[in-house]
Amino acid sequence: MKKLIYICTAAALALACSNEEGENGYGLEKGELAFSGSVYQRTDGTLSRAGADDFFQSGYMIDVTLTTNYDSTPQNFQYSYQSGGIFRGSPAFYFSLDDSYITDLVAIWPSQDIRDEGLITDQRELENFRKADWLTAEASAQNIMPTEAPVPLFFERENTMIEFEIAGQNAEGIDIQSLVLELEVEGTDPTAFWAYCGDPNGNAMLILDETVSLSSTESYLIGRMSVTDNYTYTIIFPAVTLPLEKGKRYLVTLTAQGYDMDSFVYIGTFTQDENSGIGIPFTSPELDADGNFVVTQPEQLVTMSYLIRHYPHPSTYAWASATYVIADDMVLTEEYAELYIPIPRGDFSGSIRSEDGTELENLTYGDGQTLALYE
């Protein structure tokens, strides 16, 4: 399996600068250092722009450490995100001389006092979920000179996010309402981690750092999950130990095994090789020279459905209006057919075609079974 492509299509933040009235148009005082910011998402490394409130909210604090050309001793400041999309210090750093400049600068989210308490394990509330999403930014240019505009910061993610989606038969319309996993934490006993389930896509999301590992023996009961209509499932892992790479986003497919209170949900299709890290069916279709997305693997077919259903208005690619070409030699297995979730026609204005241009409604696999591409 190819190395996993982490999704979210760079749905990042561009914290728009304020137009409030002030000495320099940003409401800043002469010589005051302020920041705007963007966040690199868990994706292909590109940076896109979205509203500031997608992450930072008014009052959110970042720690800033900097040195100057006239004082090599690190100076520490706290900056808060304010309306208008800029970070301002309380107190702020001020350039003292016309020829002064900043030689090094690092900003972190959340602040160091929160980090010192360790990764938050109960991420059910949005505020705690965001506090678990550690970010670091360095100055975007060397030798920051006095400026009338906020200095841009580009935050990179330090931790990993795992997204859980229910797939397979009878999964349509089911949202995850709660999910708890027992995970190994370096240097401690197994710890319960509660996922965030407030995203409109109906999936559960959990942020982990390098001290946490997904590890279990065969058929080990690793967690519990409740879904729409209060159905409850036991989550079972296969025998697996999965390394997680920082800054990436992984999709874990949960396959329901019935709808009884004692039913099991299995982690679907784990395969590992020396390059895959965590090998689950989340591989983005490949963009060709004509601007179409080519699906050559069944994993890409599953990912195609996910992108269209969950990212109808992304900032990088218009997944819901794109053209997808199913390669003639793409072999769909029963396993991946069960993981595929049909696309709602009302959410899709694009096209799914064969290589000869024929519009496709279904795919044939196995011993003549048919997979409907649309619901």
Image: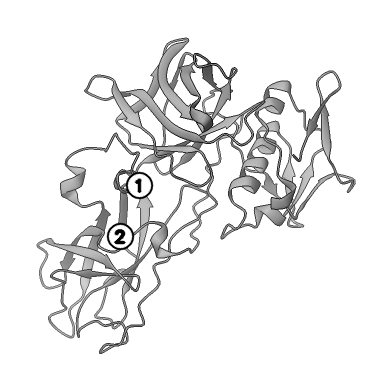
| Callout 1–callout 2 Cβ contact below 8 Å | no
Q: Amino acid at mark 1?
A: Leu
List the residue tagged with mark 2: 138
Task: Locate the N terminus and report the quarter of the image it occupies.
Answer: top right
Which disc is residue 126 wearing? Answer: 1
Does 223 sit above or below residue 125?
above
Tell me, yes or no, if residue 252 can be seen here: no
Residue 239 or residue 245, whichever sits in front: 239
Q: Residue at x 36, y 41 (%)?
A: 159
Residue 202 or residue 314, whichever sits in front: 202
Q: Earlier in the sequence, mark 1 or mark 2?
A: 1
On the image, which quarter does residue 187 sit in? top left
Q: Amino acid at mark 2?
A: Glu
Residue 309 or residue 107, whichever sits in front: 309
Task: Locate the C terminus and report the quarter of the image it occupies.
Answer: top right
Does 268 sit above or below residue 49?
above
Q: Is residue 343 left or right of residue 164?
A: right
Tell me, yes or no, if residue 117 can be seen here: yes
Q: Nearer the viewer, mark 1 or mark 2?
A: 1
Q: Which type of secondary structure does the marked residue at label 2 adopt?
A: strand
**Image location (x, y in percent) of residue 183:** 34, 23
Q: How far apart are the alpha carbons under marks 1 and 2?
A: 26 Å
Q: Residue at x 31, y 25 (%)?
A: 192
On the image, which quarter does residue 40 sit in? bottom left
Does 326 sit above or below residue 190?
below
Q: Which type of secondary structure does the marked residue at label 1 adopt?
A: helix
**Image location (x, y in percent) of residue 339:** 65, 28
